[in-house]
């Protein structure tokens, strides 16, 4: 399957999160089962800026990681027969390197390292102003698929 992009409406077919918790605005390129890249425009009126932190707003680290995980999900759910499937986090190892400020674009790049038995292992990076702000090793699952490989009780 050739790489393609997803606008904000098409994205909703592959990503089960919805605003205000959808941390992706646009998928610039996805190659199903391989990678997904895109961005989140951080308008100054995002719901989290006034509370994180008053007088020094920045995107919470948990939401930076969530954006990476959501983009990795798109790399999986664009595979045949997986559209709209719910994913769950299994584990994340994350490093934060730079604050992500209001009015910036948060660029997201993710890559699948393995996809087997309903478990995806992958990596992601979030960039702002051309610099790495966040990077993570992630493991996510589609529980519906994983259950079929678990021992029966």
Image: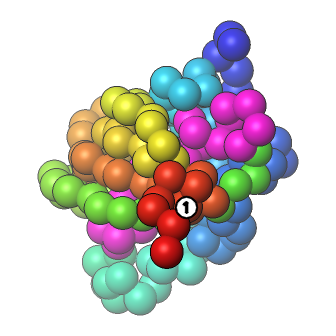
Above or below residue 115? Residue 104 is below
Above or below for 99 versus 10:
below
Work out whether residue 2 or residue 64 is closer to the camera in this orientation and state it: 2
The question of residue 13 being in magenta is answered with: no
Which is nearer the eye, 149 or 100?
A: 149
Q: Please state if 36 lies on the left or on the right of 78 as rendered.
A: left
Up-down relation of residue 30 to residue 87 (above or below): above
Please report the residue visible at 35 percent of the width from the left and 39 percent of the height from the top.
122
Helix, strand or loop for the magenta stretch, by majority: helix
x, y percentage for residue 38?
55, 36
Q: Residue 153's x, y, as percent?
A: 49, 74
Report the residue at 75% width, 52% height from top.
84
Q: Residue at x 70, y 55 (%)?
A: 85
Q: Is residue 69 magenta?
A: yes
Q: How many marks?
A: 1
User: From where the camera sits, is residue 14 visible?
Assistant: yes
Residue located beneath label 1 in the image: 147
Residue 74 horizontal/vertical position (percent) = 60, 42
Name which residue lies at 45% across and 35% down.
115
Residue furthest toward the front?
153
Q: Which residues are magenta?
A: 60-82
Where residue 46 sits: x, y (%)? 56, 72
- Quarter of the image with the N terminus in it: top right
Q: Nearer the viewer, residue 92 or 56?
A: 92
Scheme by which the image is coloured: rainbow
Question: Tag 1, which secondary structure?
Answer: helix
Q: Quadrant of residue 54?
A: bottom left
Graded by Cα atoms within 10 Å as few (under 14), some (14 to 19) or many (20 or more), the crowding at tag 1 reads few
């Amino acid at each position: 399957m050739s790489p393609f992009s997803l606008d904000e409406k098409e994205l909703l077919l592959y990503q089960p999160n919805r605003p205000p918790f959808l941390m992706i605005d646009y998928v610039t390129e996805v190659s199903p089962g391989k990678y997904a890249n895109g961005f989140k425009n951080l308008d100054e009126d995002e719901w989290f800026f006034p509370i994180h932190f008053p007088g020094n707003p920045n995107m919470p680290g948990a939401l930076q990681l969530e954006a990476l995980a959501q983009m990795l999900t798109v790399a999986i759910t664009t595979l045949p027969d997986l559209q709209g499937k719910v994913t769950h986090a299994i584990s994340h190892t994350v490093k934060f390197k730079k604050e992500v400020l209001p009015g910036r674009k948060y660029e997201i790049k993710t890559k699948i390292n393995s996809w087997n038995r309903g478990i995806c292992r992958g990596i992601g990076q979030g960039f702002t102003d051309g610099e790495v702000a966040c990077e993570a090793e992630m493991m996510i699952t589609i529980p519906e698929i994983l259950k079929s490989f678990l021992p029966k009780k």
